[in-house]
Amino acid sequence: MTLWRLPAKSGAVANSAASCHPRPVVQVQLTRHLFAFFPQLEGQTLEVEASDVAGVVRALEARAPGIGFYLCDERGRLRPHVNIFIGNALIRDRRTMSDTVSAGDKVSILQALSGG
């Protein structure tokens, strides 16, 4: 049973738009620490098709089950210790991750580490 789920884009408009307009391909960069938990992603050029940051996370979840819940809480909101950048800009919408991505964008997912 999956406890975590990002809200899907709803309605026929979203489905018909996706079939008429291919989603942009973006490159994803992860902090090295995430590879310890998701080794299947290490050494790959991570390119995903997505129109927004939530779509990027959904695409990563398809490749590495569990990464979505690692990055987001049970309501689909970005966890406080995780930051996502599109290029050099921090995303604004941490709740639904609706920030749009464009073809060729670089999305960086960073996890803060603490301790000593």
Image (cartoon, rainbow, N blue to C red):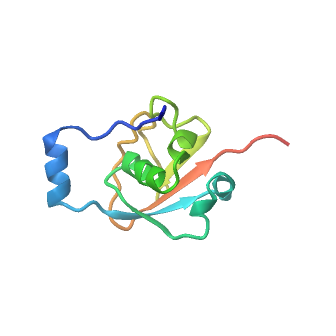
Task: Tell me: 97 left or right of 32.
Answer: left
* Image point (27%, 60%), residue name: 23
Task: Tell me: 84 left or right of 14.
Answer: right
Q: How many marks?
A: 0
Could you say which is closer to the camera, residue 92 or residue 10?
Answer: 10
Indicate the position of residue 35 as horizontal and vertical percent values: 65, 57
Q: Residue furthest right?
A: 116
Indicate the position of residue 115 as horizontal and vertical percent values: 81, 40
Task: Tell me: 25 left or right of 87.
Answer: left
Could you say which is closer to the camera, residue 41 or residue 96?
Answer: 41
Task: Tell me: 35 left or right of 5.
Answer: right
Indicate the position of residue 103 as horizontal and vertical percent values: 33, 65
Q: Residue furthest top?
A: 75
Q: Residue furthest front?
A: 1
Could you say which is closer to the camera, residue 75 or residue 100?
Answer: 75
Indicate the position of residue 24 as horizontal and vertical percent values: 31, 62
Quadrant in which the C terminus is drawn: top right
* Image point (42%, 36%), residue name: 5
* Image point (39%, 45%), residue name: 54
* Image point (47%, 54%), residue name: 60
> Quarter-wise, where is residue 22 in the image?
bottom left
